[in-house]
Image: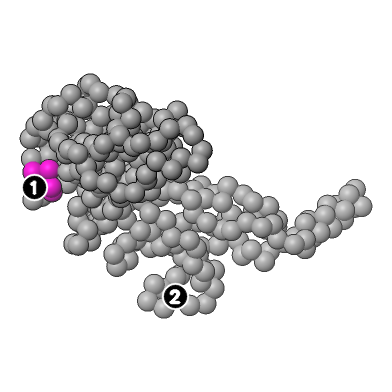
Amino acid sequence: MKNTATLGFALLCLLHSVAPVAAQDRVEDIQVLLPDGQLSRLIPAEQPVTLRISGTWSHRCTPSVRSINRNGPGRLLQLVHSVHPSAFICIPVPTAFTQDVVGVRFDEDEIGVLSVAVALTDFEAIDTRALSQGLQWLPTLDIAVQPPPEKLVPAWPTAREPPPGLYAATALYDISGGWYAPEHSGSGLILNHEPRRARGVAASVDTLWGSWANFATDGRPQWHLLSETYWASPTRLLGKVYRAEAEAVDCNAQFPNTACGFGARAARSLQVVGIFELDVTAPDALTLTIDDSGTTLLQGLVQPPVEGYRVQLRRL
């Protein structure tokens, strides 16, 4: 029996002495724990919520959450070591970390994309005015704080910015960049997205414009320009569509193709063709629906397009 205990203790010491696993301590997600036990990334302002904070640790001695307080333009999430990682029981094995924080409230001026700085310390009695010994800064993450229902824009009356005191929904993901659909050769979607930052006066409105490039059935290049947008929900964007068309490109299947020109060319026409909807199903997947039936974007539009075509895209 004595030999068995000695062997077990020696094994623990051996595991602790091996080179640390290549993993970084980090908080990876902050979600709301709903009363039914489900999790949601839709974090509402102006009401107390329970936050579930989760991440990955490089050893078995995961920390505890001390607080998530306001800190300048964002929040400071303070973590403390439950056991100092130098202890022999802190086996260097990547370990999931989860903890709930009850009664957290986000204010109206925090609606938008809010940065959360993460600080880890050895001491329980951490003084935010003199963060010093034992302090470690972990990667910062962003959360999207949503308006309460009574302050959410029910319609978009100006197509430029919400009325005073009301907010469009905060986009859950930044969807800037290039998007493609493998089954639509020669086409692509380019989006320029500037998410609304919390307390950011210069960027107080979420802005997005885009261009969906493709070809008409007769070979004419065409671009659907996406403009005057707003987020009807954190994953649903609505706006107006303009279509620009150019003359058909004089190309054929020969090589070399000397008659095929790829230089910039003036659009033959530019017209408003209707409305569009973007449904963001994941950070790297969305569905674009265009109603090109000629329907005018009505003031206060809240319904999605019902005609036109739909294409699923992936992020490049």
Q: Residue at x 10, y 30 (%)?
A: 296
In the picture as drawn, the residue positioned furthest to the top comes out as 307
Q: Are marks 2 and 1 in contact (CB under 8 Å)?
A: no
Is 93 displayed left or right of 47 in the figure? Answer: right
The residue under the point 43% across, 43% down is: 258
Identify the residue position indicated by label 2 in the image: 131
Image location (x, y in percent) of residue 14? 81, 59
**Which element type, helix, strand or loop, lies under badge 2?**
loop
* Dominant secondary structure, magenta: loop
Foreground disc of the pair 2, 1: 1
Q: Is residue 180 above or below residue 58?
A: above
Residue drawn where x is 35% and y is 36% of the image = 250
Give the labeled residue for mark 1. Answer: 163
The CA span between labels 2 and 1 is 41 Å
Q: Position of residue 46 (x, y in %)?
A: 22, 48
Residue 160 on the magenta span:
yes
Q: Quadrant of residue 41?
A: top left
Q: Quadrant of residue 131?
A: bottom left
In the image, what residue type sits under mark 2?
Leu
Q: Position of residue 311 (x, y in %)?
A: 36, 28
What range is drawn magenta here?
158-163
- Residue 175's disc number: none
Image point (19%, 39%), residue name: 268
Give whichever of 285, 265 is nearer the camera: 265
Instruction: Left or right? Give the position of 136 relative to 247.
Output: right
